[in-house]
Amino acid sequence: DSGVTQTPKHLITATGQRVTLRCSPRSGDLSVYWYQQSLDQGLQFLIQYYNGEERAKGNILERFSAQQFPDLHSELNLSSLELGDSALYFCASSVELAGVYEQYFGPGTRLTVT
Amino acid sequence: DAKTTQPTSMDCAEGRAANLPCNHSTISGNEYVYWYRQIHSQGPQYIIHGLKNNETNEMASLIITEDRKSSTLILPHATLRDTAVYYCIVRVAAVYSGGGADGLTFGKGTHLIIQP
């Protein structure tokens, strides 16, 4: 158990819909990262937040957005869903250790778009 | 971040040492070597990291060559639960504290299969 929690575990929705995925980082971690893992693209970094502010962007689509709240939990919002958005979505958190740090991943949310 | 090359798959007998190689010939002086693994559809799990010295923790050992162009992750006594995809990632450390850095770049990794 990494200490990172994600809800829901599974989500099934239709094309065109909007969903929200939730992540709670490990206690004390200020950074939250979102990743997408699909069969054809592998594990891809989407976006990072640190203490409520966006810090880095990866291959995140404009239909996707995220935020980090004052209690440090984060939400990933996916809108106008397409079949190709079906994937595992992972959240990770980290704490700074003199600039060298590891990321701790949650169990993921499996999104199925039908 | 430097590019890494790993074998697509490897087999190892249960109880034996599993040695997973990684080539990172373009690594620069301020880049660390990290290893993560992903057991089927679970979240990736951090294993170990190092800069130039060999490192050991409760999970594994990391051997980095003197020229730092390659490294080997060693699982000393592999069990069936070690069957997973192992990712070697090379990245620069955050140059400042308190700010974090961007996400990890995962390649295809090595699918390690532990045989009973």
Image (cartoon, coloured by chain):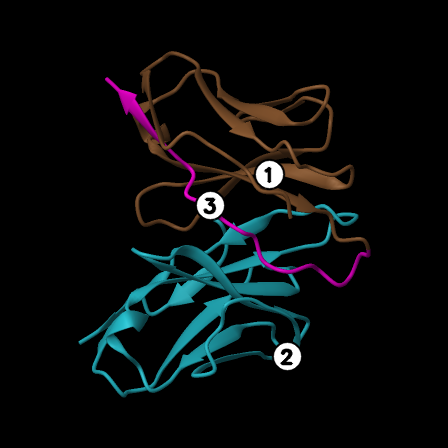
Chain colours: A cyan, B brown
According to the image, label 2 marks what residue?
A70
Q: Do the residues at discs 1 and 2 belong to one chain? A: no
According to the image, label 1 marks what residue?
B34
The kind of secondary structure element at disc 1 is: strand
Quadrant in which the C terminus of chain A appears: bottom left
Task: Considering the whole magenta stretch, tell me its main secondary structure.
Answer: loop
Which mark is nearer the camera, 1 or 2? 1
The kind of secondary structure element at disc 2 is: loop
Which mark is nearer the camera, 1 or 3? 3
N-term mark: 1 or 3: 1
Cα–Cα span, label 3 and label 2? 33 Å
- The amino acid on which the numbered mark 3 sits, given as a three-letter code, is Gly
Name the residue rendered at 35%, 41% in the picture.
B39
Depth check, front residue: A73 or B115: B115
Q: Which residues are magenta?
A: B96-116
Cα–Cα span, label 1 and label 3? 12 Å
According to the image, label 3 marks what residue?
B107
- The amino acid on which the numbered mark 1 sits, given as a three-letter code, is Tyr
Name the residue rendered at 81%, 53% in the picture.
B95
Give the percent coordinates (x, y) of residue B56. 62, 23
Which of the 4 image quarters holds residue B38?
A: top left
Q: Do the residues at discs 1 and 3 belong to one chain? A: yes
Mark 1, other Cα within 10 Å: few <14 / some 14–19 / many ≥20: many
Q: Is residue A72 above or below residue B20?
A: below
Name the residue rendered at 35%, 49% in the picture.
B42
